[in-house]
Each structure stands twice: as structure tokens, then as C-alpha cells.
Image (cartoon, rainbow, N blue to C red):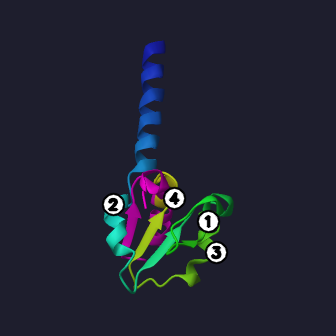
């Protein structure tokens, strides 16, 4: 009986981890390398959802800092009709931000997988 409980708990943990890492349905995912040419295009929005301290320690100049915990109250700073690129340190918080934006009517959401950990200028 104990082994089945361990297997069940393990399966639940794997499922939760999977859900946290998979972007919301309808959200495009790109690599840090694919982001580079997008930074030069006009009419795009770039949002870094890391904490202000993380952002201050190093960021991409085109990105605006809106920490994930502040995002629900700052949606009015973003245009739901324009592409919005999301980035964090590893891709997990930006994936959660993508889900939040999707639920609030944003349609053109792009998550940068691997985040700043994978970005090389």
C-alpha cells in the first residue's frame, strides 16, 4: 500500500511541475536567440516579469519591468492588440504571466523560453 501512495504523490508532483512549465494554450514560445531580431522591430511590447532587483542587476534595454506579482494591477500599461514578449530568469514566471494575459484577453503573447539564463547579447 505504501508504494502506491509514493507513486501517487510522485505523479502529482510531476503533473504540477509540467503544468508550471508548459505555456498557456495559444501562447507562442521562442528561444532567446529567436528574440534578438524581434528586438529591432517596431510596434512590439517587451515585458520582463522578474523582481526589480533582478531587473536592475541585468536586463535587455528594450524590456519594461513589470514584476509578475504586479502584473494583474498593471494590465492597463499594455496594449492587448500588439505582440507582447515575456521574459523572466528561466521561463517559469513568464509562462505564468502568459497565462494571466491570455485570461485577460491578450492574444499575441510570446514567451521567451529559458529567459535571461539563455540570453547572450
> Dot 4 surroundings within 10 Å: few (below 14), some, or many (20 or more)?
many
Task: Report the magenta residues as a range.
Answer: 95-121
Going from N to C along the chain, the mark reached first, 3 or 4, is 3
Q: How many numbered marks, from 0 up?
A: 4
Task: Tell which of 45 and 68 is nearer to you.
Answer: 45
Q: Which residue, given by chain and number where applicable, does mark 1 sit on? A: 67
Quadrant containing the C terminus in the rendered view = bottom left
User: Which residue position is annotated with label 2?
Assistant: 33
Q: Position of residue 118 (x, y in %)?
A: 42, 52
Q: CA distance from mark 3 to mark 1?
A: 10 Å
Front: mark 2 or 3: 2
Is mark 4 in CB contact (under 8 Å) with mark 2? no
Q: Are marks 2 and 3 in contact (CB under 8 Å)?
A: no
**Residue that numbered label 4 is attached to:** 88
User: Can you give x and y, in whole percent of width and height, for residue 8 in the image?
Assistant: 44, 27
Give the residue drawn at x 43%, y 57%. 119
Which of discs 2 and 1 lies nearer the camera? The answer is 2
| CA–CA distance in space, label 1 to label 4 | 9 Å
Amino acid at each position: 500500500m505504501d508504494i502506491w501512495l509514493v507513486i501517487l504523490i510522485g505523479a502529482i508532483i510531476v503533473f504540477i511541475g509540467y503544468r508550471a512549465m508548459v505555456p498557456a494554450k495559444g501562447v507562442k514560445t521562442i528561444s532567446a536567440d529567436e528574440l534578438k531580431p524581434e528586438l529591432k522591430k517596431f510596434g512590439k511590447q517587451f515585458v520582463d516579469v522578474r523582481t526589480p532587483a533582478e531587473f536592475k542587476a541585468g536586463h535587455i534595454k528594450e524590456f519594461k519591468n513589470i514584476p509578475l506579482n504586479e502584473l494583474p494591477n498593471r494590465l492597463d500599461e499594455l496594449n492587448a492588440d500588439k505582440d507582447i514578449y515575456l521574459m523572466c530568469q528561466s521561463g517559469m514566471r513568464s509562462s505564468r504571466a502568459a497565462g494571466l494575459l491570455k485570461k485577460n484577453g491578450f492574444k499575441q503573447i510570446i514567451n521567451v523560453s529559458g529567459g535571461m539564463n539563455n540570453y547572450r547579447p
